[in-house]
Amino acid sequence: MPLMHPDRLLPSDPAQRAIARRLYAEVSGLPIISPHGHTDPVWFADNENFGNAAELLLHPDHYVFRMLYSQGVSMEALGIGEGGGAADPRESWRLFAERYHLFRGTPSRMWLDWVFAEVFGLEQPLSADSSDHHYDHISATLETDDFRPRALFDRFNIEAIATTESPLDSLEHHAKIRAANESGEWGGRVITAYRPDPVVDPEFEGFQDNLQKFGDLTGEDIFSWQGYLAAHRKRRDYFASMGATSTDHGHPSAATADLSAGEAEALFKRVIADDVAPQDAELFRAQMLTEMAGMSLDDGLVMQIHPGAFRNHNRKLFERFGRDKGADIPVQTEYVHALRPLLNRYGNEPNLAIILFTLDETSYSRELAPLAGHYPALKLGPAWWFHDSPEGMRRYRSQVTETAGFYNTVGFNDDTRAFLSIPARHDVARRIDCGFLAQLVAEHRIEEWEAAELAVDLAYNLAKAAYKL
Amino acid sequence: MPLMHPDRLLPSDPAQRAIARRLYAEVSGLPIISPHGHTDPVWFADNENFGNAAELLLHPDHYVFRMLYSQGVSMEALGIGEGGGAADPRESWRLFAERYHLFRGTPSRMWLDWVFAEVFGLEQPLSADSSDHHYDHISATLETDDFRPRALFDRFNIEAIATTESPLDSLEHHAKIRAANESGEWGGRVITAYRPDPVVDPEFEGFQDNLQKFGDLTGEDIFSWQGYLAAHRKRRDYFASMGATSTDHGHPSAATADLSAGEAEALFKRVIADDVAPQDAELFRAQMLTEMAGMSLDDGLVMQIHPGAFRNHNRKLFERFGRDKGADIPVQTEYVHALRPLLNRYGNEPNLAIILFTLDETSYSRELAPLAGHYPALKLGPAWWFHDSPEGMRRYRSQVTETAGFYNTVGFNDDTRAFLSIPARHDVARRIDCGFLAQLVAEHRIEEWEAAELAVDLAYNLAKAAYKL
Amino acid sequence: MPLMHPDRLLPSDPAQRAIARRLYAEVSGLPIISPHGHTDPVWFADNENFGNAAELLLHPDHYVFRMLYSQGVSMEALGIGEGGGAADPRESWRLFAERYHLFRGTPSRMWLDWVFAEVFGLEQPLSADSSDHHYDHISATLETDDFRPRALFDRFNIEAIATTESPLDSLEHHAKIRAANESGEWGGRVITAYRPDPVVDPEFEGFQDNLQKFGDLTGEDIFSWQGYLAAHRKRRDYFASMGATSTDHGHPSAATADLSAGEAEALFKRVIADDVAPQDAELFRAQMLTEMAGMSLDDGLVMQIHPGAFRNHNRKLFERFGRDKGADIPVQTEYVHALRPLLNRYGNEPNLAIILFTLDETSYSRELAPLAGHYPALKLGPAWWFHDSPEGMRRYRSQVTETAGFYNTVGFNDDTRAFLSIPARHDVARRIDCGFLAQLVAEHRIEEWEAAELAVDLAYNLAKAAYKL
């Protein structure tokens, strides 16, 4: 029995499956557009071989190690964090392999099986018994030229991928990639995206130092409100020159504000002082979303808002191992009142593109679809993070489509740092979308020719258009 | 291929579809009970021909033009609003026809296809190519006698329809219809419903002027608390004499209050003054729901509560084009604490009927089904507005039924001003309900004879009983 | 046609049903583990016959009488409450039988049908016509020895059942059962669980008197903070000696706190005084959850948290008939901020087991699955109360599994006082879980051998392990 069944994730109802197969056949081979994610540009700039199996597939994947951690496996034993260097990666891998049953029913299981089978040609499922074989085979294969980042990028049929960088990033890796593009050395399209949280969020670690660097980098009078805004404009332009077509904003809430120039300036003075009040920090982030929308209207960068994660919920883990260790938890997120200041200012602009995401699925049918189905400036991003999964995507389509339609959505984002899983993630999205469309056809809600058009739009065209790629 | 497949919206699973077909065959021909909606009584009073296709199907349908607006089509170009008069309706229609793909997967698409096929006999789907043909055919057909409002009413097999009027409405059109009923000129039953928001909500446009008119109309000392209440009683009686069996209350929240007579009187004094505080406005609306429940206990009018819309969210659009322009957005709505004052006063009255609606689907299983499955005075209205759709209705049934059962619900409301779509909307509800029941039968949760009984109850009996029609 | 179809609740899709049947065949005969519920230990201690049909199946089942009450049947007529003694139970039963159609589509209907068919061998559905026959047959059967509590316990194949007692309970019935166990008179395993709400919640009826009794029972200086904590430790130990493996906490919210020793002591002083402020009551409950977690870490008792019910929502009903009369209503419940104080203190302890429940299904995918998929100390309890139903369980699995997996859940709880329905409730859970697993197999998301393993885990192993039974 092959690891990956050709009909996986298609509905089992015979009428729907037959339609879904036909739809999927039209989209399975389309190139990948990856307009938002967290791969590391140095991979494509330097094209060095990846390390061993644990280093590539276990250590950076918080979906994977959070599950192991929840079942009592320590971070140290998995080789994660400072003390983690001491762990033998082959033994860390075994802790994972022995517990692979924990992932039954999760998307990680499907992504990993795909990587094992399709990238590495492994035929047995991962288990305690196959642990060493998998580890050794993967690690050895990764040493070959065919498994360097650029070769995999080409093999994965990626048409364009966006990484995500802080305004303080030099973008040197992107410069190197562009040089390779221009010299004809390599044709892969890797672009950046402008994620200014470290210089926008007064509660970000090192905010004041970050501002200082931001000033140094741009030559602007950074501790003045006008200088600060000018620095953003300058840096956005530089990012755009490195291919960026979008910005991204990861705020605790979706709050926006539309202060007068005087109020905004006074607020800026308060947030650059020591001991920022939490309300001021929130208000400043809120105001900056509106400022960024205004800049997007000028420079054409698509604006993404990713709100609603309680970051670093586990204090001890954060103090010991730092950010992004699987301890970010979604919170209830309100959009209707929160976005109104920004929307009253810019919501009617047909030339502005704001892509909204949520970790709070209750907002799909109640708030986001009604908003995106009205405001010209709004579109909805795909099911995100914890909800980037078969059931999560089905809920998204069934709760969003009837009010927002398909054309106020923007196709799929993989949003991952797990490079090898990117084709698997897009494949899951294509299969689930084809299944959803097949249901609409089987229930005679749309015609099959329409579903075929939509399948291509959802897999390819919408992302390309929405992100101006 | 016909535009409307006979099995549309029935589940595609073969076992379920066979059962659903049998159930649907029993209910598809039942008369329509439309106990809550927004058709214009002047249509049935004067029986004038409708205008052209754009005027009838595009301009008044906020589901349709909001989607077009969200994709960058201006209100002016669609012929909506003051500046809209300038647009050629045939060109406005073309903007719609060219973008008909935007509606794929939405209920509007199914309602419109039904109207095109079943009302107008059109055989081609709407598209850029068929735009003029559709426009001309519909517009020409509308000029014939068979397409006057009363003829369509009869053809649609409507047993009773309720419109919705403000207490300030003269009900002259209803009087004319009743005269036609009595003279035997026309038998259609068109009744009104008492919607007092303009004289209950201190934040309604023109509240003070509205009160003045309310006083003039009733001869009561309207700026005294007792006179104000007496005016309501008098006007409710008049509405009842014009056939009303229900009232309707469209408040921002579900808040209720049960103040002492002295507190209520003092509150009334504050809200009739200039510059009402928002908390007072909210408290007054809350108190008035309880007052209205008390009057319903006396006069037998069924009380409907439709809370949870943020009206006129788009400020610029509101300032330019006014209310009901597709910019009302649902907000999170709490019921358990909100309704308690009213329920502690009247919730145990088996002779009181309060029908609750929601735009916040999270309340279905958490709050509304548990409340309606306990309090004798409460029943649940059907899936409403954005959720009046195949998936929305399925969520409603699957989230409400297990706790509230079917018999604490009240059948279907079309709640529309789009007169021609009324049969399509009831048909969608009947199909979805038959599909839901078919699943229960196919999973051996109820017997098919029970489902057949329920199908008729959901399509006809429950609405008739709940609204005392 | 038999009352209970062998395929009931299995998916009707042919591919899924075939798989589900095979899975269900593996688990249908497994013993019942009932780790949390509300049966009365006196039944098993004294082994007296149950009373008549109304007394056993109608009066204690708030799912049943709340539905009848919602449709206008009075509590008195049903024989419930003080005035209820006057009602003829056969006539009360008839009120129920005549309205049995109200339960179509509810889980009560499935549980009751199972009890009628499988426990009592009745072949006709309950209705007005069969009312007397059912009543007489059930009542007569209950007088026989085969229908005494212990005989039913054995027939139901219950391996272990936990009841729930207050710290003030003498546990005399449990002592009698243990004596019967030890003497070989009866082998049934009936254990208690520690539910300290009456001495933890300052707003519980009679809180101060309860504390006094708590002091008398334990000999501790109960009105001192240290004495109070010592009393808990002592009583927990006694409960453990009577078989308890768990505690249970039914709070209005999930709030936790982690005060300093001095703050906690000062708070305790405030809550034992008259007129406790609501914020102090809430804070004390919050602090006590963290204290209880600390004690669980010491004594190994599994900690259950059941938050989010607004108890006794119907004031008049409560004043007249008291607690647990079907008027408890779920409210929106927040977990991410609420649990953080406790989790920052104890969340990383792999030897602590906290089982979380919710009545707010919106928290499944947004909060609970992400929390349980990270923290070693957390697991998720099954769908609870209003959501312990076919659709409720399906929502639970489809919203929880992708992030938390199956192994951060704990199998099924029946949580009932309706003893006769216990096998039916476990059977519903097994069928729904097998159906869910069958879908995963039919969509090639897991292999069938994995589903077979999972089916046994969900039906038996997980509950046994999570509750240390």
Image (tube, coloured by chain):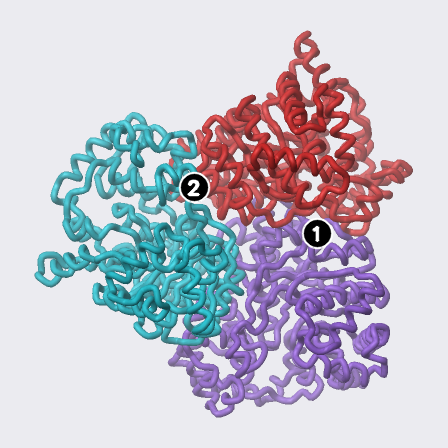
Chain colours: A red, B cyan, C purple
| Residue lying at the far front of the rendered structure | B274
Q: Is residue B257 visible?
A: yes
B339 to B359, vertically: above or below: below
Identify the disc placed on residue C371: 1
Tell me the chain of label 2.
Answer: A
Of all chains, the one bearing label 1 is C
Residue A468, horizontal then vertical, whole percent: 54, 23
Residue A336 placement (x, y as % from top left): 51, 45
Considering the image in quadrants, where does the N terminus of chain A appear? top right
Position of residue A318 in the picture relative to residue C390 (left or right): right
Give the structural element (helix, strand or loop) at label 2.
helix
Instruction: Work out which residue is located at the far bottom of the displayed protein and give it.
Output: C86
Instruction: Tell me: C301 left or right of A307.
Output: right
Q: Which residue is mark 2?
A: A440
Mark 2, mark 1: which one is toward the viewer?
A: 1
Tell me the amino acid under the disc marked 1.
Answer: Leu
Q: Residue furthest top?
A: A183
Q: Which mark is residue A2?
A: none
Which quadrant of the view contains residue A283?
A: top right
Label 1 crowd bin: few (<14), some (14–19), many (20+), radius 10 Å:
many
In the rendered image, the quadrant that contains the C terminus of chain A is top right
> Observer-nearest residue: B141 or A447?
B141
Give above or below for C464 relative to B169: below
Mark 2 Cα within 10 Å, few/some/many (few <14, many 20+)?
many
Front residue of A117/C163: it is C163
Q: Quadrant of residue B35?
A: bottom left
Q: Please give left or right for residue A45 compared with residue C83 in the image.
A: right
Residue ID at (61%, 44%):
A359
- Towards the viewer: B237 or B180: B237
**Picture layout, residue C86 above or below residue C375:** below
Q: Position of residue A244 (x, y in %)?
A: 62, 22
Q: CA distance from mark 2 to mark 1?
A: 35 Å
